Amino acid sequence: MDTNSFRPEMAAALDPETRKLTEERDVLGPAYRLFYRNPVHLVKGRGSHLWDADGEEYLDVYNNVASVGHCHPRVVEALSKQASMLNTHTRYLHENILHYAEDILSTMPDELDRIMFQCTGSEANDLAVRVAQVYTGGEGVIVTHEAYHGNSALTSKLSPALGTAQTLGLTMRMIPTPDTYRLVIDGKPASECTAEEFGNWMAGEVRKAVADMERHGIKFAALLADSIFSSDGVYPDLVGYLKPVIDAVHELGGVWIADEVQPGFTRTGDAFWGFERQSIVPDLVTSGKPMANGLPTSLMAVKHEVLEPFAGSIPYFNTFGGNPVCMAAAQAVLDVMRDEDTMGNAKKVGKVFKDAVTSLMPEHPCIGDVRGAGLYIGCEIVKPGTKNPDQKAALDILETLRDNHILTSVCGRYGNILKLRPPLVFSESDVDWFMDGFTKTLETLKL
């Protein structure tokens, strides 16, 4: 997560106004990060487009936060109308939270019949882990090698993607990234495995992790994972491979917390929720950023029997989790997703996008693999003729794309995978814009 970052030593190359703004950020402390060697000063957004302080237009190929597009008029109207009347906490009755709770649960399997609201994805995952631990009586949580699940004291210790300086939890265990590009299973490339073969391999890794917990006196509680392993590098396939994994989790006494912050809300184009692609019902579901188009809103949906041991004895209060303004915005987002068919758009435009990027592979061997589902695509940058990750080339691509007014980022263990995750209103003309800029970038860099 720290690869595509501005550093103070880069300030000398900036224009005076940009340098002044970066220096003024000192008041925020050194933990914050800016994208790009030449940071972008954004002042306006509409749909999948952004504008900087000089009026220059950019293509946003990064933000799932503004899920239905920057400043969608229906969302702006809904939050403005509610903000002009009332915004308060959930210890008073209000229709917005009840109506939205019923509506969003209607998009999930019937077994998920309870919901609680928070302000951030970190808080949602924090609560989900606590609920899982009380339900199972265990502490141990399994995550993947490059997972990111939040910034709270609890979830940061379950987020190896934060980097080597981040202390990880003593009761946490990591299993390998389900890397369908590089893994070899019993002498067979993962890309040639069936879903059952790949799933059985991953289930075996879960069993090894739980066995190690037990050797250290730790009782297993949960697997915390998103269904397309976004921060690991975007691995949505093979469809069906997670069933043996979750069967193993349940057999070992744990639960599955499906982190849907990135794959949820029609992102994959195949279903409203990412986990639906795998035809599995999670025990708990969390989501955050896309819910209210960037307002501080998140959720934890859960089976009532899993929630009861926690909620029946421990009060939970989140001052502005589920407040009327955020619930109005979240409802507007959900309405827009239905009325504008963001799922259909993600499927249609996502295929066009993925096919277009894939078509560059023969001429540009730095592109080792292109994978994804809907409007979530990972483009792996490697040293030509190998599968060796090339982080330097990936970062040079990012910087040159930025020069061509296209904004995105990287993910994965080696920081070499372009993370193409635009707003759900991304269009075929936006694909054309990206492809023109991407092709020009690769040619400029002689890649």
Image (spheres, rainbow, N blue to C red):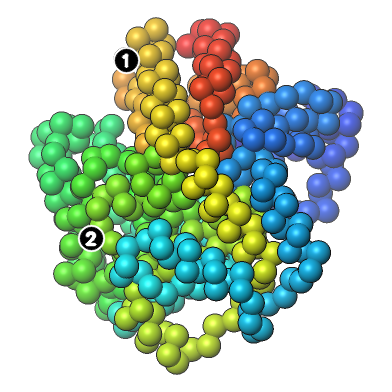
Q: Can residue 399 be seen here?
A: no
Q: Which mark is residue 246?
A: 2
Name the residue located 52 percent from the left edge and 45 percent from the top edge.
Answer: 339
Label 2 and label 1: CA atoms lie apart by 36 Å
Q: Secondary structure at mark 2?
A: helix
* Residue type at tag 2: Ile
Give the image location of residue 243, x and y in percent.
20, 55
* Residue type at tag 1: Gly
Q: Secondary structure at mark 1?
A: loop
Name the residue located 40 percent from the left edge and 41 percent from the top edge.
Answer: 268
Give the image location of residue 30, x and y in percent.
72, 51
Q: Residues within 10 Å of mark 2 (few under 14, many from 20)?
A: many
The residue closer to the viewer here, 113 or 340, is 340
Q: Is residue 370 above or below residue 235?
A: above
Numbered-mark total: 2
* Quadrant (top left/top right/bottom left/bottom right) for the N terminus: top right
Name the residue located 18 percent from the left edge and 62 percent from the top edge.
Answer: 247
Q: Residues within 10 Å of mark 1 (few under 14, many from 20)?
A: few
Q: Is residue 171 above or below residue 311?
A: above
Q: Is residue 113 above or below residue 377?
A: below
To which residue does mark 1 refer? 385
The residue closer to the viewer here, 57 or 394, is 57
Name the residue located 34 percent from the left edge and 74 percent from the top edge.
Answer: 303
Q: Quadrant of residue 194?
A: top left
